[in-house]
Image (cartoon, helix red, strand yellow):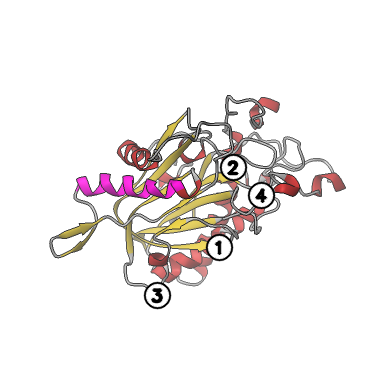
Amino acid sequence: MKNLLTDIAGVRVGHADDATVASGVTAILFDTPAVAAMDIRGGGPGTRESALLDPVNTVERIDAIALAGGSAFGLEAGGGVQAWLAEHGRGFRIRDAVIPIVPGAICFDLLNGGDKNWGRYAPYRELGYVAAAAASTSFALGSVGAGLGATTANFKGGVGSASAITPDGVKVAALAVVNAVGSVTVGDGPWFWAAPFEVDGEFGSRGWPEAFTPSMHAMRIKGGPAATAVENTTLAVVVTDAILTKSQAKRLAMMAQTGFARAIYPVHAPLDGDIVFAAATCEKPVDPLVGLTELGMLAGNAMARAIARGVFAAKALPFPDALPAWKDRF
């Protein structure tokens, strides 16, 4: 176990980003199509192919997921991932036609200091292609890919990941792009809200403060009173090797959202577009009631850990007035 999304066999992750633009793309590829669904809790989401993932709709499996910065411009990243898959003959087959199925979602990073004057064509389609081509079982965390330009209320955000395994050997893993309106730390201190779920010092072993004060519970949001509904979003993917139906994958996504609440304060606000994709590679049986409940519990824990790791691993952007990284201060 590498404590990454790619601890699930048949899953690969690739990043591509542009330091001048201060934005990028993260592509999650499945070696064989995965059963998938999604759950949206934030009030300002931006998605591609989200209707397809509704359990009542026909297509059961997907080939990849594209996560990007760039707000609505970043939705083009899915086209780049799709192009790479098409070149490799991957996709949903309808007689002689092959259509790669690539849902996706975006977060807002247009005001982070990078040069967004890219002219007629935004760079995200090309970045999506490069991210797909780079996908492997090892990948970086922090200020990379879709997390390059991500921020939170008080520290630089980024890409995090974590994994877990049930006593029966079923694996579940999470990846998060942390661009939250809220804070991932308790107050402005070194403690992460996700501290009770930390494994093996994966985000610094700081625990919680000896005592909580009222100021620690005060709301810290990106933009303060001027915060808007389009500037923030935490994007996440949870994958398991369990055999799940589309409806069960939806339930897994819903339970994984509890990890957001364990790691971000406040969360699921009208100012966020928080989204969880859930996918199943369908290798191992799981009990549909108690087993799925345990899997969802671990998915929520892994999600909280992934969110904390994304901030813990991040590096500050090299622009005036850029938010500090957690490691810059602690």
Q: Position of residue 195 (x, y in %)?
A: 68, 44
The label shown at residue 56 is 3
User: Which portion, as a residue range, is magenta?
Assistant: 73-88
Earlier-in-chain disc, 1 versus 3: 3
Image-quadrant location for residue 17? top left
Q: Position of residue 106 (x, y in %)?
A: 48, 49
Toward the bottom, the furthest residue is 56
**Gap between marks 2 and 3 measured at Cα:** 37 Å
Q: Nearer the viewer, mark 1 or mark 4?
A: 4
Q: Is residue 10 visible?
A: no
- Residue marked by disc 1: 255
In space, the residues marked 1 and 3 are separated at their CA atoms by 19 Å
Tag 1 and tag 4, C-beta contact below 8 Å: no
Question: Does dot 4 land on a helix, a strand or a loop?
Answer: loop
Residue ranking furthest to the right: 214
Whole-number angstrom distance, CA of label 1 to CA of label 4: 15 Å
| Residue at which label 2 appears | 199
Residue 16 within the segment the image draws in magenta: no
Under mark 2, the amino acid is Val
Left or right: 92 as drawn, with respect to 176: left
Q: Nearer the viewer, residue 330 or 149?
A: 149
Q: Earlier in the sequence, mark 2 or mark 1?
A: 2
Please, is residue 235 above or below residue 323 in the view?
below
Residue at the disc numbered 4 = 264
Along the viewing direction, whichever of 204 and 227 lies nearer the viewer:
227
* Number of residue marks: 4
Is residue 228 shown left or right of residue 74? right
Check disc 3 and report its element: helix, strand or loop. loop
The dot on residue 270 is none
Establish if 298 lies above or below 68.
below
